[in-house]
Amino acid sequence: MEITEVRIFLKESPDKKLKAYATVTFDNAFVVRNIKVIEGQGSLFIAMPSRRIKYPCSKCGFKNESRAKYCNQCGSVLSQPVRPQTSVNSQTEHKDIAHPITQSFREYLQKRVLEAYEKEKSSRNHGATSSFR
């Protein structure tokens, strides 16, 4: 699988860890949006698009955000859900929507996104977002 385009959308707040969003096109046929470029401890890395995990109300079954205290459908008090222990961080409230399966592809994807991020950051004076093929 080849990455055929990377578009970077810089974030303006310099003191935040989130530096940009990326949209990546694969084989001119498939797009993944909202890949985040994040500043970690001493280096940049990418985080794949994710969504908040929702838990069902025991009374009506409506799916509520994980930290909700009351059901948004019926108003019942929600018990705190038991978080799955399958993730590295058991406090996580998000689940990846799309992600690389192999380490080598993750490294390839991260390299291409971070290269495009650095190019976009250096050409920031032009004011518009760019795409890199």
Image: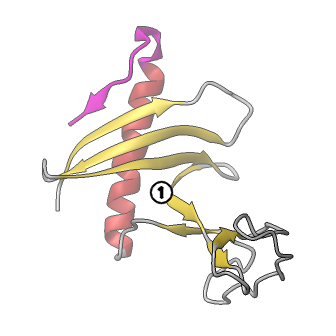
Answer whether residue 128 is magenta in the image.
yes
Which residue occupies the extreme left position in the image?
A: 28
Amino acid type at mark 1: Pro
Q: Residue at x 38, y 40 (%)?
A: 115
Residue 108 placement (x, y as % from top left):
32, 59
- Compare residues 54 and 130 and report the one nearer the observer: 54
Q: Residue at x 48, y 25 (%)?
A: 121
Q: Residue at x 47, y 59 (%)?
A: 48
- Compare residues 84 and 70 and report the one nearer the observer: 70
The residue wearing badge 1 is 49
Q: Is residue 53 above or below residue 3?
A: below
Answer whether residue 84 is magenta in the image.
no
Relative placement, left or right, of 2 versus 15 is left
Residue 114 placement (x, y as % from top left):
43, 44
Position of the N terminus, as image quadrant, is bottom left
Relative placement, left or right, of 56 versus 120 is right
Q: How many residues crowd mark 1 within 10 Å: few (<14), some (14–19), many (20+)?
A: some
Q: Is residue 84 above or below residue 62?
A: below
Quadrant of residue 90 in the image?
A: bottom right
Q: What kind of element bears circle 1?
A: loop
Relative placement, left or right, of 125 versus 2 is right
Q: Residue at x 61, y 89 (%)?
A: 86
Relative placement, left or right, of 6 versus 88 is left
Q: Look at the image and give the residue range highlighted in magenta.
A: 123-133
Q: Is residue 72 above or below residue 129?
A: below
Residue 55 placement (x, y as % from top left):
66, 77
Task: Report the coloring of the rendering.
Answer: secondary structure
Q: How many marks?
A: 1
Residue 27 placement (x, y as % from top left):
13, 53
Position of the C terminus, as image quadrant, is top left
Q: Is residue 112 above or below residue 16?
A: below
